[in-house]
Image (cartoon, grey):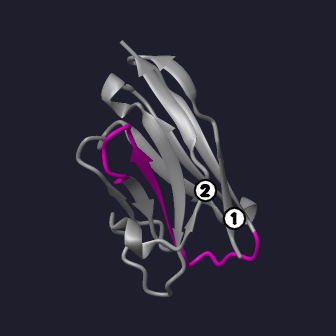
Amino acid sequence: QLQPVESGGGEVQAGGSLRLSCTVYGYTYSYYCMGWFRQAPGKEREGVATIRSDDSTNYADSVKGRFTISRDNAKNTLYLQMNSLKPEDSAMYYCAIDRRSFCSGGFDPSEYHYWGQGTQVTVSS
């Protein structure tokens, strides 16, 4: 059983930066796809960024050029560097793992098998 644990959330002013981390406990394979999702109150969970085993990445249009996803397999840790934050980025951010051998790195939450508890990001104007 894999258990992702997120950290690094908080409150920041618009234009600021935050770095989220997700440490995965349990046995992991570097070929898993991993991703960051977010959910604001009253809205559906949406994909933010994903990374595949070959380190290819996928970003939502709303965060391209501002967010960077990366992974450190030796530390079993996934990161999300968030720059130029906007109030509309405020949400609970979740780390997720797709354990399939040929995962797509897409934004469909149903394709991800393990989820963290989330870390809150609040951006004030």
Q: Residue furthest left?
A: 61
Point out residue 18 in the picture as x, y percentages from the top left corner: 53, 30
- Residue at 50% x, 19% y is 12
Point out residue 17 in the picture as x, y percentages from the top left corner: 49, 26
Three-letter residue code for mark 1: Gln
Dot 2 falls on a residue whose secondary structure is loop
**Is tag 1's residue or tag 2's residue first in the polypeptide sequence?**
1
34 lies above or below 8 = below
Relative horizontal placement of residue 59, taking residue 114 as reference (left or right): left
- Residue at 69% x, 75% y is 28
> Do the residues bearing badges 1 and 2 touch, measured as CB atoms within 8 Å?
yes
- Residue at 56% x, 36% y is 19
Point out residue 5 in the picture as x, y percentages from the top left corner: 68, 53
Q: Residues within 10 Å of mark 2 (few under 14, many from 20)?
A: many
Q: Which quadrant of the view contains residue 40?
A: top left
In magenta, the rendered stretch is: 26-47
Compute the Cα span from label 1 to label 2: 7 Å
**Rendered-image quadrant of the C terminus:** top left
Relative horizontal placement of residue 1, taking residue 57 as reference (left or right): right
Residue underneath mark 2: 116
Q: Residues within 10 Å of mark 1 (few under 14, many from 20)?
A: some
Residue underneath mark 1: 3
The one nearer the camera, 90 or 60, is 90
